[in-house]
Image: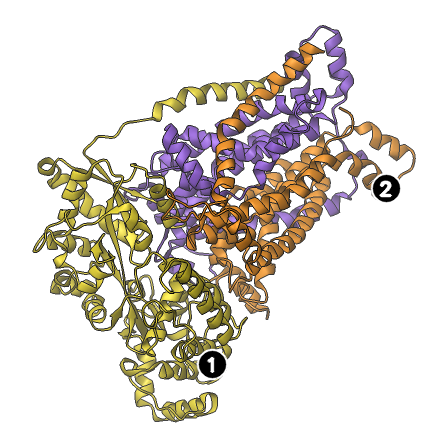
Chain colours: A purple, B yellow, C orange
Amino acid sequence: MTGARWNLLHTGGAWALAAVCGVMFSFPVLNTVLTSLKTAADISSAPPKWVFTPTFEHYANVFYAAGYRFSQFLANSILISLACSALLVVVCLPAAYSIVRFGIGRARLLPAAVSLRLLPPVTFAVPFFIVYSASGLLDTRTGLVLVNLLGNVPLGLLIFVSFIQELPQELEESAFLDGASAVQTLWHIVFPLAYPGIGAVAILTFIWTWNEFLFALMLTINKATTVTVGASLFVTAWGVLWGDVAAAISVAVVPTLLFSLFVQRYLVRGITLGAVR
Amino acid sequence: MRDLTMRGCVFALCAAVTLIMPAQISGQSPTTVRMVYWPGPESDAMRKVVDWYNANRTPADGTKVEMVLFSREGFFDKEAAVLAARSSEVDMVFTASYILGRHAPHMDSLQKAVAASGEGSLQIFLPSARDSLSFQGKPYAIPMDVSNHFLYYRSDYLDRLLTDSAWQRRYTDIAQRELGKALAPKRPEDWTPEDFVAAALFFTKTINPDSPTEFGTVLQAKNLIYNVMIWDNFLYGLGGSWFGSGFQPALNTAAAQRALDVYVTIAQKKATPAGSTAYEYGEANEAFRTGKVAFMVQWSAAFHELDDKTKSPQVAGKVKLAPVPGKKTHVHALGVGISTYSGAKAGVQKWARFLATTQAMRMYAQAGGIPPVRAALTDPALAKSRPEFPVIAEHVEKYGYVETTIAETVPILEILAKHLSAAWALQVVPKTALDRANGEIMQLLKEKGYVK
Amino acid sequence: MAQERRLGYAFLAPLTLLLLGLAVFPGLYAYYLSALDATLETFRSPRFTGLTNYVRILTDREFYDAIGFSLRYTVVVVTLEVVLGLALAIALNRELRGKRILISLLLLPLMVSPALLGIMFRLTLNEFIGTVSYYLRASGFPANLLAPPYVPYTLMVVDVIQWTPFTFLILYAGLRSIPDEPVEAAVVDGAGGWQILRFVILPLLQPLLLTAGFLRGIDAFKTFDTIQVLTAGGPGSLTTTASIYVYKMAFLAGHLGRANAAVVLLLFLLSIPMSQAIRHILRRTP
């Protein structure tokens, strides 16, 4: 395993950097969680209150306010993000393998797929709306899975291509010689070796899909609304209901956090090379 | 083991997903009317009316109303997509005076849908609100909420200014020094835009160390079309207007220059918080609520929040309302109208006729809406909990104006927001900003055939 | 070999289907609309206007201003994010107690939608009730971070806070899969830390560095939600990104045709760095 043998930073330096970044990066979210527990008067108090009597009124609003159906939004988001994350791996990993090992799709398909990321989503909402209303995909979870899949294909392809081309080809060749089919090779050799890449892609796709706002806004009416769009319902024409938005965000972070904790275990190299041989 | 779990997970998920997905394509009951609303006090109020209707009228009318909320961020963009795609997902469209021109081509005129007079007709609404939801002479939406602007002021400070002779001398000195004119304090009800500027300077600490507030006023100077509507009051109050004769843009006039100078002077003298360039409704309220400013021009909806002891303990009870200096207030209405592509026209019309009754609008007002209906706004029982309601009715009738409801309203507002916000932030000289805005509006109106 | 090729096509089939099924129509539609005088009202009965929209966009000074702002913004944030992300990945590429929790903390800002994070920053950066503003003011710094001249830098800092975890995660995954042998060989040869980084790790990590930088670069160039919520592109057009320009053209000015012409032009512009990036991400060996 990757040990301390070639660390470029002293442990002290590593800790310091990680700690500083950890504090800086988690501040916006931790501040949001604090906000979600404050009353409106505490939220607008200056100096900021760090010690206060917590209130759960905002959480009650988020879950029980008439007409907001937050639990359904949450369920939609979980289903859509999980599905998108899993399907992306299934679609992109074989494609990337084919691009790297067989050289098919290098010239046309890869650039075409990656160029999807170049498009600013704003203008595409209208044509997508037309396609979706004609095909019955409007306001369905399937519709949102598909559109998010499209948005993440560039990420999945590029990361998988980068990973697969670093894998030692001898393993696959010896598997071939042993009579394994390409599918078996992909499944038994490439898949485990690419774990860190799969983990990163799974986490990033899940998070992207969870957070996606524009298409989730445009392509839903009320059945497939996601939690991100749901949280924005606490922004009114007359200002932001800070406590309610903060509570909605705090709740919405939990599933993503759990998912990333779960997938992180795959961020280490799956199998040492010797063990496969 | 780990590799098996991972691969197992991926497959199990894909399988689960394919099974779950098809379950959700569903039909709609033909008698359900789907109405779009935006979230906030308006939808909270409307929900009560919808619930009452569904409980009491559905059996007789055979119509059930379903209200769906679209996010406030990108609300009209989403509606535009729904309408442009001619979708029948939505039966009733939520619209506003400033965007009606864009929605009207996709909506049915209400002429035949509602009654001609009396209850169930548009006659129950204030004329200016009704007009603000008419397009090319025909009504397209039922006005549900009316919005106008007030001057909100701290009565404790402004009253003292009228009685304390030391303050009054200081006021005149500051006006002389900063504006070159020896102005005397006046009642806020009588302010001109010039008095507004002078008072803003007086209540600014850097100019007057004895000022009880850090800043005189708070401007909403973010690049937003809603902030242009607030500035418009000064334009119209100083005798200006968007258009000269016909649709000839008139934003490079002396009146426009003076109106812009009101903002620019206040910004230059730092009589508004430095962050104002990123301010909108909420931020201005925070500045007022935390006692940083003495007065501001703000939307009518803010009073309910600022005069509330639990939400604004520092200022509640000390907030008074006056006409916007110059005595003109932008008025727009939010309303609902019928989508041309609705598949449930008969049901929508029944619901529309119900909304156009005093009974429904009283209910709406009690639940927190601000319906432009005299009988609802001046209802004595209601005026106790919402003392601003009669004032709204009075100001809308006396001082209200509607810029225009043509389809180009939003593009014009957008051009103004872009150029005026640059001037408000002192990034561009006022004259340049106005010339650019006027030029772009001219080009737009020429392209659309309004101007030869 | 023939069988191998067939299999290769089979592996590419799902992706191809997805692209054909979902992306082709909206993509072509953009080109189609860009040649029409389509507006939101006349959406279904537009007139063909040839290249007029392109001329209008190409002669619009604000289009270039938006591209200029987006470019500067992108260069600054991507540089910071890649360097910081790499440093963090190296720092955490060892056995540490509680590392999973630490990584999760580092990933937190990614887990909030940019649109919502922008809304929360409106509170945090509020001049009077914002936490950050309060302490800045208390320590004698300007508290109005959303006003010029600070506003572009504030937006960049927000971007770095939110997106460094993205580059970190990709590079961390890459570091985890670098085999020990070449590094160990370098250690045996007496190479120091910087030499190992420069001559062993960076070359091995190059495809992923490029991938992370490229993806972030494209996304940063297209930044929309956070800036739209915080400044709406203002004051004036000071912080208008390419996406905000397109959005305003399409939905506020109402010119779907011109907005799509701008999109097509942006597509051409961005496809240059894209083809470069892909060329360098793909190693020579087929």
Looking at numbered disc 2 in the image, what kind of residue is underneath it?
Gln
Examine the rendering and report whether any part of residue C207 can be seen.
Answer: no
Q: Chain of mark 1?
A: B
Q: Amino acid at mark 1?
A: Lys
Residue A26's place in the image compared with B422, above or below, is: above
The quadrant holding residue B404 is bottom left
Q: Position of residue B140 (x, y in %)?
A: 23, 52
- Position of B275 compared to A12: left or right? left
Mark 2 belongs to chain? C
Asked if B251 appears above or below C189 in the picture, the reply is below
B27 left or right, relative to C194: left
Task: Point out the residue furthest to the right here.
Answer: C189
Count of numbered circles on the image: 2
Q: Residues within 10 Å of mark 1 (few under 14, many from 20)?
A: some
Image position of A167 (left or right of C248)? right
- Residue C176 place in picture, x, y as percent: 71, 32
Instruction: Using the image, tell me which numbered label, if any, was put on residue C195.
Output: 2
Q: Which mark is residue A89?
A: none
Determine which of the numbered discs, if any, sits on residue B205 in the image: 1
Q: CA distance from mark 1 to mark 2?
A: 59 Å
A179 above or below B164? above
Residue in the foreground of this view, choosing between A144 and B228: B228
The image position of residue C87, as x and y in percent, is: 72, 45
Depth check, front residue: B318 or A179: A179
Nearest the eye: B16 or C249? C249
Numbered disc 1: secondary structure: loop
Quadrant the C terminus of chain B occupies = bottom left
